[in-house]
């Protein structure tokens, strides 16, 4: 994860609103989002449930390493092709039109990671001082060397948090519109 340098940077959002229609996501929905004009990334709502011990429903979404305006084939929308770890988010991406639902299909076992693990930082300021937790917030006895591609920070985000992570990935790849423009 990249370090934020200011509150303005934390609140900056380059996400593009794709629809004016208020949508309510449900498990199995395939959606696209746009972190920059002409750039489309694909995601899927995996489940709507209570997470980390709270008594409120949130969305668990996957963002795939699938970039393009046309819906990718099913062989691309698989857990082994995640751009970054599963994220727990509220519904603002759908209700505000930043995430456009394109289709909905029943989820198969092969569409879902066997385990969802999240990083819970201990608050010491060290990026290496953390526990791994499951969806309920229970600490796991798991190997901390697990690929960070399948990990996200415990807690809740929204479309803006996903946009920030996408911007970081695109910048690292040198494919961000800001880094490719003259």
Image (spheres, rainbow, N blue to C red):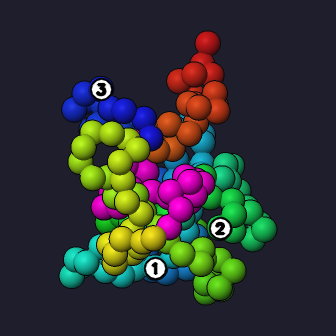
Taking the image as shown, residue 61 lies to the left or right of residue 177, namely left
Residue topped by disc 3: 5
What span is in magenta?
Answer: 142-164
163 is within the stretch colored magenta: yes
**Picture quadrant where residue 174 is located:** top right
**3D distance between C-alphas at marks 2 and 3:** 32 Å
The image position of residue 177, as x and y in percent, is 57, 28
Mark 3 or 1 closer to N-term?
A: 3
The vertical placement of 26 against 167, above or below, is: below
The vertical placement of 160 against 140, above or below, is: above
The vertical placement of 169 against 20, above or below, is: above
Residue 63 appears in view:
no
Q: Callout 1: helix, strand or loop?
A: strand
Find out whether the residues at labels 3 and 1 contact each other: C-beta distance under 8 Å: no
Mark 2 or 1 closer to N-term?
A: 1
Mark 2 or 3 closer to N-term?
A: 3
Residue topped by disc 2: 79
Taking the image as shown, residue 4 lies to the left or right of residue 179, namely left
**3D distance between C-alphas at marks 2 and 1:** 14 Å
Find out whether the residues at labels 2 and 3 contact each other: C-beta distance under 8 Å: no
Residue in the picture at 54% in, 75% down: 115
Q: Which mark is residue 47?
A: 1
Residue in the picture at 25% in, 27% down: 6
């Amino acid at each position: 994860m990249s370090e934020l340098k200011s509150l303005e940077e934390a609140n900056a959002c380059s996400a593009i609103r794709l629809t004016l229609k208020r949508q309510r996501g449900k498990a199995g929905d395939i959606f696209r989002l746009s972190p920059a004009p002409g750039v489309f990334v694909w995601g899927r709502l995996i489940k709507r449930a209570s997470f980390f011990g709270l008594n409120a429903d949130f969305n668990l979404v996957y963002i795939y390493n699938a970039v393009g305006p046309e819906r990718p084939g099913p062989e691309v929308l698989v857990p082994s092709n995640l751009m970054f770890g599963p994220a727990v988010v509220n519904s603002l991406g759908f209700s505000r039109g930043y995430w456009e639902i394109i289709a909905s299909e029943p989820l198969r076992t092969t569409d879902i990671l066997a385990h969802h693990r999240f990083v819970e930082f201990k608050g010491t300021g060290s990026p290496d001082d953390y526990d791994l937790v499951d969806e309920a917030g229970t600490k796991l006895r798991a190997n901390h060397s697990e690929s960070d591609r399948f990990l996200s920070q415990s807690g809740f985000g929204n479309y803006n948090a996903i946009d920030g992570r996408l911007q970081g990935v695109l910048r690292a790849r040198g494919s961000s519109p800001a880094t490719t423009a003259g």
